[in-house]
Amino acid sequence: MVDDPRGLRSQYDALIGTEWLDDDPEHARVRIPMRDELRQPIGLMHGGAMSSAIESVCSRATALAVLDEGMAAMGQSISVSFLRPILEGHAEVLARARHRGRTTWVWEAEVHDAQGHLCALAQMTIAVRPLPRPAGS
Amino acid sequence: MVDDPRGLRSQYDALIGTEWLDDDPEHARVRIPMRDELRQPIGLMHGGAMSSAIESVCSRATALAVLDEGMAAMGQSISVSFLRPILEGHAEVLARARHRGRTTWVWEAEVHDAQGHLCALAQMTIAVRPLPRPAGS
Amino acid sequence: MVDDPRGLRSQYDALIGTEWLDDDPEHARVRIPMRDELRQPIGLMHGGAMSSAIESVCSRATALAVLDEGMAAMGQSISVSFLRPILEGHAEVLARARHRGRTTWVWEAEVHDAQGHLCALAQMTIAVRPLPRPAGS
Amino acid sequence: MVDDPRGLRSQYDALIGTEWLDDDPEHARVRIPMRDELRQPIGLMHGGAMSSAIESVCSRATALAVLDEGMAAMGQSISVSFLRPILEGHAEVLARARHRGRTTWVWEAEVHDAQGHLCALAQMTIAVRPLPRPAGS
């Protein structure tokens, strides 16, 4: 798993259980292991958990790439199609930055289950903006 | 807050902290109180938490409406635009079913912060399908 | 029908047959009368004609509102759900600017047929950028 | 260019100027040559023309694939991100069916200009339904 030298993991990702596998914008990757806390009422993995993992991987990989230029990354929009339910194992998100503009990055992402079935397809736009200064600086 | 007589709340919603306010498809409503576990690295509420709440309220309100016909509701697609960050207070989702078809319901949803600012806009499609039988039945 | 004092109608809109009814960002409105050139193979109005009308009305109403500040409006993303086919009469698009930011406007739009049935729901993001200078200026 | 043995081209595509290059769901392809009738007010190719071409290629390739089973294809939703304007040459859409379900096909599509630049990214869901009978049959 990749390190977090610059503090770009979040408490929210700890809550969801996101495991960071790759930060490369060509093939950024995270995994969320299935557990009961991620189930919706019928017992499937909640789509919100998948959306969360997609947003985390796209935001973090963009942030890591633009941080040295003093920029921050924030989710601007996400669109997800759910194709196949996940009942056990894990959800693995593979994301690729298809457009790296000055003010927005646009990502395509796909979610597979542990058997390699395609379970969701997504498109995400990340806004790139000057990093907010810490209070008092 | 509304009751859950038919078990349509999920462990995932307990994890996120979703509070159920209204199940009426004309003005379904949930709220998620801000807490540190919902923050992304910069400290804002993670967009995935908002997407999760949107999906929960649309799915549950559809499920409650079609349950008596022996049907289940599953998220088919979600599209969210994030307009304004949420730092404290809560996120409140207001959702309205704009199309109630035989096989899909289409929802519009909006997210406001505790001051009433519009923070996100969403569209969600919920697939309506025959209820899966419990295993062993 | 509204005038076009500042040349914000396009040849493309003439091709589609867009009629401009209202430019107010609270209730911008265009109509496209059905004709055979707008049919897809089964005979319904092509979804692309509806998407075109949605993009035109959102772009033009944004452009008119920001033109005096020296800004131009360009479509950044569009998302449309098609709910009900249109066979005859017309498609009328009603659009409302829900977010008017410094760099983006976000619109919700709906398409009705001549009988008033809801036929499509859309969300569109328009980028607001400094107006390109004419070549040679 | 591919033939149209089964009448799946439309008058609307003739209006837009769609050229059919490939119907294979793995790499379906159409092209629209730029001409003045496709320009929006600033002179760029109207996004609606690109959305139209995306919808045409995804619908037609799905329709051709399911026609022999007595099924028809209709656009259910489309989502397009516009990345780079097209001023001249043409727009070429390359689409790939990522999910071929019983009731929906989900496509990813990308639009390139004549220089090969990526100009738009899209996701489209096509509903697959029993073919309507011709009137009088």
Image (cartoon, coloured by chain):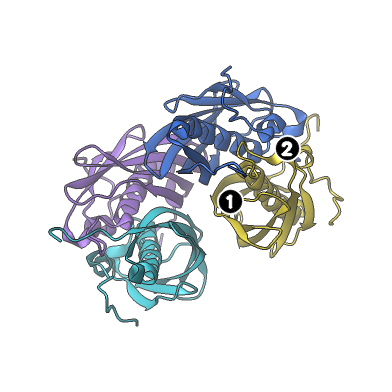
Chain colours: A blue, B yellow, C cyan, D purple
Q: SS for tag 1? A: strand
Q: Please name the residue that numbered disc 1 is placed on.
A: B125
- Report the front residue among B6 and A90: A90
**Res B130 visible:** yes
Image quarter of residue A32: top right
- Please say if C7 is above or below D106: below
B79 relative position to C45: left or right: right
Q: Label 2 crowding class (10 Å Cα cut-off): few <14, some 14-19, many 20+?
A: some
Q: Position of residue D122 (x, y in %)?
A: 40, 44
Counting residues from the start of the chain, the first of labels 2 and 1 encountered is 2
Q: Label 1 crowding class (10 Å Cα cut-off): few <14, some 14-19, many 20+?
A: many
Q: Position of residue D82 (x, y in %)?
A: 36, 49
Q: Position of residue C4 (x, y in %)?
A: 28, 78
The quadrant in which the C terminus of chain D is found is bottom left
The quadrant in which the N terminus of chain D is found is top left
Image quarter of residue C23: bottom left
Which one is in front in this view, the residue at disc 2 or the one at disc 1?
2
Q: Position of residue A7 (x, y in %)?
A: 60, 28
Residue C29 badge? none
**Res A127 visible:** no
The kind of residue tagged 1 is Thr
Q: Farthest left residue?
A: C136
C51 relative position to B56: left or right: left
Instruction: Give the spatial CA distance, label 2 vs label 1.
Output: 28 Å
Q: Please name the residue that numbered disc 2 is placed on.
A: B37
**Residue located at (59% from left, 41% from top):** A134
- Report the front residue among B132 and C59: C59
The kind of residue tagged 2 is Glu
- Please say if D58 is above or below B106: above
